[in-house]
Amino acid sequence: MEDRRAEKSCEQACDSLKRQDYEMALKHCTEALLSLGQYSMADSPGPCPLEIESIKIESLLYRIASFLQLKKYGQADEDCRHVLGEGLAQGGGAFQTVLCCMQLKGKLQLVSNILAKSLTGESLNGMVTKDLIRLKTLLTETETATSNILSGYHIEDLEDGSCNGWHFRPPPRGITSSEEYTLCKRFLEQGICRYGAQCTSAHSQEELAEWQKRYASRLIKLKQQNENKQFSGSYMETLIEKWMNSLSPEKVLSECVEGVKVEHIPDLTVTVNTKKSHQTWTFALTCKPARMLYRVALLYDAHRPHFSIIAISAGDSTTQVSQEVPENCQEWIGGKMAQNGLDHYVYKVGIAFNTEIFGTFRQTIVFDFGLEPVLMQRVMIDAASTEDLEYLMHAKQQLITTAKRWDSSSKTIIDFEPNETTDLEKSLLIRYQIPLSADQLFTQSVLDKSLTKTNYQSRLHDLLYIEEIAQYKEVSKFNLKVQLQILASFMLTGVSGGAKYAQNGQLFGRFKLTETLSEDTLAGRLVMTKVNAVYLLPVPKEKLAQTQGTKEKVYEATIEEKTKEYIFLRISRECCEELNLRPDHDTQVELQFQLNRLPLCEMHYALDRIKDNGILFPDITMTPTIPWSPNRQWDEQLDPRLNAKQKEAVLAITTPLSIQLPPVLIIGPYGTGKTFTLAQAVKHMLQQQETSRILICTHSNSAADLYIKDYLHPYVEAGNPQARPLRVYFRNRWVKTVHPVVHQYCLISSAHSTFQMPQKEDILKHRVVVVTLNTSQYLCQLDLEPGMLTQDTDRGLLMLRASAFSLDQGLANCSLWPAVCFCK
């Protein structure tokens, strides 16, 4: 059974507050908050994340009211800062939605009245009350807005409207007040709008009125769903979340399920050259043995207004019985069909698509038979002008790889053993594979010159896949036949020096490159930086006839060392034994370089993990104001070497979180003190607040180590142990290559002299964590609570480091991971 202790304690707190039993209300609030903290560790199922957040905010508001009545003003102010800081940082209107639900239930006025009484009466012991005043204003605005929305509407009218269907376009999402809906000036003045159905403003007074009515209807439904503990879209959201977090995603969602044959008309990918178009797909699902279809749903929100389920029927191959499907259906729930002892059962599902604009539209349809994996089918329609389609066709022909890549369909591939790939890495490589059809990549969407909140994720997914294809094409220029020199050891060159010896039946192979491997060429740069393995195919001295149906065997070998003229391979024991390789002998082989796909897959994963991209697209209409005071400007704790502009940056970074600021960018050429300024901001925050935690995230390892060697290490040595940082290094980095001073702040295994990945406890022990863009993803795997690393992660990811930083550099190093960690 689902655990409802937190919800019950929250309700008891509300009742106690109404009875003016403030001590008891305080007790119940604390019980509710403690229960919420235990759900992640408990075996029994608890509320969903939306419910947890709702209960948390409601309990904190009741506790603030209780503290005020008990004259514990300091504790009330602390809770108030927590509510404002965490609630407003969520974005997407989630905080305002909780307040609206409380207002509809008649609970918000209880807290609002106590706040008003406390702030207009006593002086609260001289305490600064700006946060409490801000909360009171927010509650008052919510009460006013909700009453304005509902005035003039009867619940019956709203429910009738939603049942009979609306007359105009669905209103844009992400609106937290009906007053935010506006009329489109362009449409009213010219009678036409370039954005068409995608326009976020109403095209008539009647449409605007209906949008406001629909907003009120949603508030009513939200209240009802909150009471029934059913949240809109919970099935789709739960399924996506489970798929994203699974180490075996193919066991959650799959395009093929045993016992179910899928046929579809027409193709899943369709291209049209007209702006206004209509398309339907029919899926025939033949289940043998017969099984019940419990649910059909459209999974993603991105293009949901353009897709709908229009028909479902069930029966055998000759007779079909139509099922009831509501208009504009997004999720159909079945499970009531009688199968009458049939040994097989056929379901037919119709999906419709409509558009009046150019664009690339994707949707995933899931067919849930009550077991995992859940069957899914992906559809895509690309609507583009004739000129754009010709341009895309030309680009596609240029980019398709000319060399035939070896894969499991053409060769028997023997993987290198032992394989050090983790379960998470394996799941990412499976989840993000290049679409088989290039038509799915070269679509109208990649021609869009602007990135927006709505197209950001889908467009970057497409561009990453196209980048991968382009990299394959370039690296194929180094596919070659070589004379491979087999070695048992070789000398290392460069700074590291020393020698390497083969062990456990493995051997090394050395070959000379046919041309100088230079980072001045595209292919050379890719081989030097993006390739860590090759496929090796022995070339027989005499051409042997290949048996019909058999595949040639190729062996994976890892790249051990690269120089300008030679590449050294590590060859597996199995390959050495089967090819009878011996040291100091040569063998002729054909090689194909294999790109390391993992970094690109990690970028896809980072994109999918971003639930709110508000930090990437801040509201530029708001003019930020950095609070100034003489005490802050001439604070003795600030380093006197800071100039005026540097000091302004430090003041912006160290502004309390209760004051909303967009991400802070510090921009300047080399030598202008950006790193120095950020380091001073870190020191100032450590002195300013005992609870602040800071994430320092840089572009490179050398930059990350610079903060420790030049700033944090001397500061710790000077008697400031609270500044002791935790440096997170890639687990396979050679320890000897890291500066000895930095060793003191790393997690190093004494037994194996290797870097260790941090656990949650390690993060909690340190107030400063230093990572690179790549290693920041390890923090995302620790299930850290949002806000654990505050201040500068919220202020703009403290260090997207002080150098010339370009978009392609940032993307290539997974620069989204810090945002993912703290926006989840």
Image (cartoon, rainbow, N blue to C red):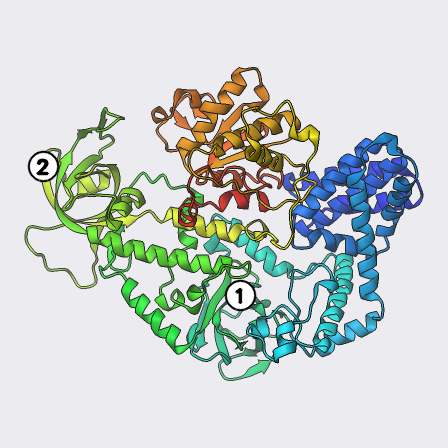
Q: Residue at x 29, y 55 (%)?
A: 472
Three-letter amino acid code at disc 1?
A: Val
| Observer able to see residue 327 | no
Distance from label 2 to label 1 (Cα)?
A: 56 Å
| Foreground pick, 694 / 485 | 694
**Quarter-of-image position of residue 661:** top right
| Foreground pick, 152 / 802 | 802
620 relative position to 697: left or right: right
Of the two numbered discs 2 and 1 on the same chain, state the one appearing first in sequence. Answer: 1
**Quarter-of-image position of residue 440:** bottom left
Mark 2 crowdedness (10 Å alpha carbons): few <14, some 14-19, many ≥20: few
Give the secondary structure at mark 1.
strand
- Whether 110 is drawn above or below 453: the answer is above
Q: Which residue is mark 2?
A: 585
Q: How many marks?
A: 2
| Observer able to see residue 39 | yes
Q: Which residue is mark 1?
A: 366
**Quarter-of-image position of residue 767:** top right
199 relative position to 702: left or right: right
- Residue 170: percent from left, percent from top: 65, 71
| Foreground pick, 801 / 35 | 801
Q: Residue at x 60, y 81 (%)?
A: 322
- Residue 515: percent from left, percent from top: 15, 46
